[in-house]
Image (cartoon, rainbow, N blue to C red):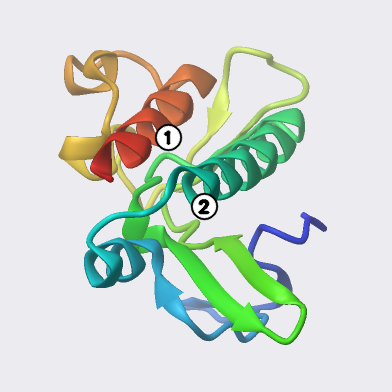
């Protein structure tokens, strides 16, 4: 993915017993830490953060990628000279749609088919139904409700 609000993957190295992924270096606080430190986020800041995250999520979904673990801990805010960077991180539970079989998700054998943080998961996922784009959107709604 080449999107300014999505953590960039730089390199992948495969070894017989593990895979090492090198990502861009990002610093800053998680969205959760930011919310806790502020106690309250003003509406304009909330709108900016949510709009940015939803646009990034749309970019993922346009590429047929599900994040499957969206939560404030997996969003990083980094203050720079030009403003605040907002990045979606932690793609360890993500999966992609098979382009040849539009109902089949490529899910790593090392992760569960139902995964994520229960408090942010859509009800249908908790009932063992398949992952869908709607599950990620539901998680964004829970993030908004957090503050």
SS at circle 2: helix
Q: Nearer the viewer, mark 2 or mark 1?
A: 2
Task: Name which residue lies at 28% across and 45% down.
Answer: 147
Q: Is residue 52 above or below residue 75?
A: above
Q: Along the line of sight, which residue is nearer the eye, 143 or 114?
A: 143
Residue 45, which numbered label? 2
Q: In the visual, does 142 lie left or right of 106?
A: left
Residue 73, which numbered label? none
For the N terminus, the image quarter is: bottom right
Q: In the visual, does 136 lie left or right of 59?
A: left
Q: Is residue 60 above or below residue 40?
A: above
Q: Along the line of sight, which residue is nearer the eye, 32 or 101?
A: 32
Across the whole image, how many numbered discs are drawn on residues? 2
Counting from the top left corner in percent of width and height, residue 115 is at 28, 40
Counting from the top left corner in percent of width and height, residue 9 is at 69, 70
Question: Residue 14: in sight, yes or no?
Answer: no
Which residue bears the numbered disc 1?
Answer: 140
Counting from the top left corner in percent of width and height, residue 136 is at 46, 31
Task: Name which residue lies at 37% across and 37% down.
Answer: 144
Counting from the top left corner in percent of width and height, residue 86 is at 60, 63
Q: Mark 2 or mark 1: which comes first in sequence?
A: 2
Query: Which image quadrant is residue 56 in?
Result: top right
């Amino acid at each position: 993915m080449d999107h300014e609000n999505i953590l960039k993957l730089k390199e992948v190295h495969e070894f017989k017993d593990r895979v090492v992924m090198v990502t861009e270096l990002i610093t800053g606080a998680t969205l959760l830490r930011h919310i806790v430190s502020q106690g309250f986020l003003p509406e304009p800041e909330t709108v900016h953060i949510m709009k940015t995250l939803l646009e990034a999520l749309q970019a993922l979904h346009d590429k047929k990628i599900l994040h499957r673990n969206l939560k404030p801990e997996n969003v990083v805010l980094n203050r720079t000279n030009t403003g605040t960077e907002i990045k979606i991180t932690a793609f360890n539970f993500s999966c992609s749609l098979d382009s040849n079989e539009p109902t089949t998700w490529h899910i790593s054998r090392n992760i569960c088919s139902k995964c994520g943080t229960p408090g942010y998961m859509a009800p249908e996922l908790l009932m063992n139904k398949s992952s869908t784009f709607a599950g990620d959107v539901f998680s964004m709604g829970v993030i908004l409700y957090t503050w």
